[in-house]
Amino acid sequence: MDQQENRLVWHSYTLFMFKFAENIIKHTRKLAKEHCYGCEVDHPSQRHHTCIMWTDEEHLNLYFDEAFDSMKTETITAQWKEEIEHLNIPELLMTRLFSFLEKEAPSREAIQVMAKRMRALEEHNERSTQGPRKIYYQFSQGGADVGPDKLYRILKSKGITIDLTSSYNATPHRTLNNIAPKDVNTNNEADIWAHMYLKPKTSNKGLKPYHFKINDLVRIASKNSTFERSYDEHFTREIFKVRKCFRMQGIPMYRLKSFLDAAGAAGFIRGNFYENEMQKVHKNEDSLWYIEKKIRKRKRKGITEWLVKLEGWPKEYNQWVAEQDITDKADS
């Protein structure tokens, strides 16, 4: 935890330097503007008014010392504190952050380097057509570059993490026999271990009832191919019957058989099925069945019959149907 807090303090210190350098840049621009107005008064003709051609970098070099001396660390610290108050950082950690800032105020050279880098990237963003670049600061040699936006996210997440971790370790756990993790020691660890692993566990959770019954008619989910459309049917046209209901680790599962109750293993469908892989179907003697195609025709006892293949069913279910029993869906 100390290492994490130290890292968080360093994040905070870097953000403070960003804030300090940002105020320095604003103040140097203000000083340069005041100088430019004064120079215009002294030189009515613009011929000798060379300061209007100075760049922001030259203004920063010229007025940095004056701007740095006019900046008060206490004022910037107060502004920065207002910005991070909404991050829900624990009170003790906030105290440590600001006590560190009081002892380790950033040096003049470090702030000047930070301000120059910020200004250089601002100038790059003004000229760039590839979108703005963020201002980055490398924590240590060989370390990762982290920008101020990410620093604020780290500061918020780490602060909340520390707060949650402290709260978690101080909360009694039912698994530990209502003892908080921070109170576990060598004197009670054996009793806690026995409570966790030797005490018989009782479950009051009721078993989920079966959704399907024996001989219910169901369709099963079909496997989708790579180019299958989501608006197509995802269950088979072929219908099966439930032949067995059982539980596996308390989860209802089912085994199926063929629709025509074929004898022996030939009528059994391989595999076990979950409830979400099945869809109940209601069929009776008056139900209509879709015909995929007519295979051939014959005439028996003066009645014309067609050998038809039912849509979505295997060829084992091909059967002879009287022509008068075949209805065109378009005419119905």
Image (cartoon, helix red, strand yellow):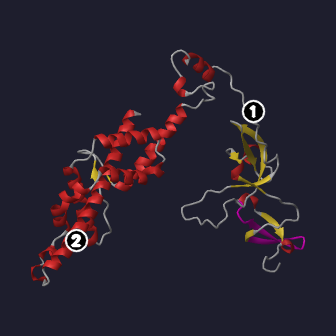
Residue toward you, 303 or 274: 274
Magenta stretch in the rendered image: 295-313
Residue 192 locus on image (x, y percent): 59, 20
Q: Main secondary structure of the magenta part?
A: strand
Q: Secondary structure at mark 2?
A: helix
Q: Secondary structure at mark 1?
A: loop
Q: Which residue is mark 2?
A: 34
User: Marks 2 and 1: which is nearer the front?
Assistant: 2
Residue 323 is tagged as none
Quarter where residue 189 is shown? top right
Residue 204 is tagged as 1
Residue toward you, 134 or 233: 134
Residue neighbourhood size for the residue with mark 2, other residues' Cα within 10 Å, grouped as few (<14), some (14–19), many (≥20): few
Is residue 248 toward the left or the right of residue 190 in the image? right
Residue 264 is inside the magenta segment? no
Residue 91 locus on image (x, y percent): 46, 41
Residue 271 locus on image (x, y percent): 67, 44
Residue 6 locus on image (x, y percent): 35, 38
Identify the residue shown where x is 64% and y is 67%: 231
Identify the residue shown where x is 81% and y is 51%: 216
